[in-house]
Amino acid sequence: QVQLVESGGGLVQAGGSLRLSCAASGSIFSINAMGWYRQAPGKQRELVATITSGGRINYADSVKGRFTISRDNAKNTVYLQMNSLKPEDTAVYYCNAIVRVGAGLPFVSWGQGTQITISS
């Protein structure tokens, strides 16, 4: 079993900052990519940012220059620093990881989600 636990969500005014954390725990052999996705009301879940174990990073165009993803491989933790937040960033943010348990095939694990609300 693998669990991803997110923290750091909340309510902030436009222009403010928040930092999300997501820690993976359980019988983890290795973690390949980790990332953040978000889902606004009435919309599909979309990619925000991903980072591989080697440090290769990908951002959605809508967050480039404002959000920074990072990870601590020793702690199996991924972070998302969000600056210059906009009302359109309001969504539930989900942590995601591609995990291997033992010698098995990698699979995708999701966190429970954390609400981010940006007031104008």
Image: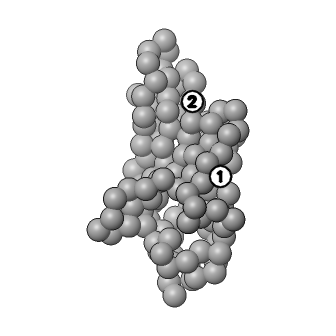
- Residue type, label 1: Ile
Residue lying furthest bottom: 120
Would residue 103 be visible to someone looking at this image? yes
Q: Quadrant of residue 31?
A: top right
- Where is 87 relative to 105, above or below? below
- Where is 100 relative to 49, above or below? above
Q: Quadrant of residue 13?
A: bottom right
Secondary-structure class at tag 2:
strand
Q: Position of residue 111 (x, y in %)?
A: 43, 46
**Left of 27 or right of it: where is 15?**
right
Q: Which residue is mark 2?
A: 31
Q: Which mark is residue 69?
A: 1
Q: Nearer the viewer, residue 91 or 61?
A: 61
- Count of numbered tags: 2
Q: Nearer the viewer, residue 56 or 23?
A: 56
Would residue 27 be visible to someone looking at this image? no
Q: Nearer the viewer, residue 7 or 66?
A: 66
Q: Position of residue 73 (x, y in %)?
A: 68, 34
Q: Position of residue 52 (x, y in %)?
A: 62, 36
- Where is 4 relative to 38, above or below? above
